[in-house]
Amino acid sequence: MQTPWGNLEVSDAHVHFFSKRFLEGLGAQCGKNGSEVAEVAGWEFPGTTEELAHRWAGEFDQHGVGRSVLIASIPGDEVSVAAAVAACPGRFYAFAMINPLAQNAAIAAGLHAICLFPAMHGYSLHDARVDALLQQASERGMAVFVHCGVLTVGIRRKLGLPSPFDMRFSNPIDLHAIALRYPRIRFIVPHFGAGYFREALMLADLCPNVYLDTSSTNSWMRYEGLDLPTVFRRALDVASPKRLLFGTDSSFFPRGWNQPVFELQVHALSHLGIAAESARSILGENLQRILAET
C-alpha cells in the first residue's frame, strides 16, 4: 500500500468477523433471527462463513491490505474464524472470544489467539479458570488479546440488550503479574488501553511481552485531553515501534475496511516524523512476527 514512507505491506491487527453465527447468537438474546439483527443494525447479511471470508479478502485486495486478524466476537464462534482461515489460506489470523467462566471453556484448534473480555463477562484475570486457559495458550505459544478500559457494543444498544459490563475488571495493571508469569505469551492490549493509557504504558514498560493495538477511533482520548500524535509519541517512547500493532476495528458491510482510521493513524505517525523502518514495523511486520509461530 502506498504510504508517506513508500509502498509498505499493511496488516490489520483488529477486524471483527460478524458471521451468521454471531448474528444468530445476538438474536437469540432478543427474540430475533440473524437476518432481523442485520436489518436492525443496518448491515448486510454475511451469508456463509466462506462467503464472508472471501468478501473480506476482496475488500483487503481493493485497499491493498495484506494479512488481517479476524476476531470471532461472541463466545462459541471459534469455528467461523477457523473456517475463514481455511477458506483463504495465508490471508487471515483467527482470534476468538472465550468466556473462562463458561462450562468446559477451552481453546479450540485452529486459533492464533484467544480474546479475553473481563469486564464484559465479569471475572478477574487472576481467576483460576483464566489461568487454566493461559496455561494452554502458553503451551501452544499463542497470543492472548485482553480488552481493557471502556467497552461499548453498539449493536447491543440497537437491539435493546443490556450491557452490564463491570469496569472493576478492566485495568491493564491486572495483567502485570500474569504477563511476567507467562513470558511465552504475547499479550495484546487493544485501543492503547481504551482510557487506561497511562496504565497500559506502565504495563508495557514492565513487561516486554505486552503489545499495544492502535485500533479504533480511540475516542477515549477525550477523557485525558489527548490527540492521536501525542498518544503515538508516548507509546513509541515506552513500547518502541516493535510493540505497536496497527489495527482499524473494522467489522461490518457495507462499510467494510475502515480506511479513515488508517488515514488518521498514518497522518499522526507521519506528523511525528518516524522512520520508514518504524512504519513498516507498526503497520504490518510486528503482527506477522508475533503470530508467525502460532
Image (cartoon, rainbow, N blue to C red):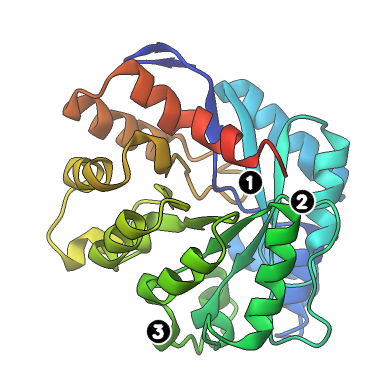
Tag 1 secondary structure: loop
Q: Residue at x 21, y 42 (%)?
A: 237
x%, y% of residue 8?
47, 16
Position of 173 with respect to 223 (left or right) is right
Q: Residue at x 55, y 87 (%)?
A: 123
Q: CA distance from mark 3 to mark 1?
A: 30 Å
Tag 2 secondary structure: loop
What residue sits right under mark 2 in the picture? Answer: 46
- Residue type at mark 1 is Phe
Circle 1/circle 2 CB separation < 8 Å: yes
What residue sits right under mark 1 in the picture? Answer: 253
Nearer-the-camera pick, 116 or 81: 116
What residue sits right under mark 3 in the picture? Answer: 167
Q: Is residue 158 above or below residue 66?
A: below
Q: Dot 3, how many residues are within 10 Å of its Cα: few (below 14), some (14-19), or many (20+)? A: some
Asked if residue 161 can be seen in this view, the reply is no
* For marks 3 and 2 on the same chain, the one whose residue lies earlier in the sequence: 2
Position of 181 with respect to 3 (left or right) is right
Position of 289 with respect to 56 (left or right) is left
x%, y% of residue 74?
70, 70
- Residue type at mark 3 is Met
Q: Which mark is residue 51?
A: none
Picture quarter with the C terminus: top right
Q: Dot 2, how many residues are within 10 Å of its Cα: few (below 14), some (14-19), or many (20+)? A: many
x%, y% of residue 50?
86, 43
- Residue type at mark 2 is Pro
Tag 3 secondary structure: helix
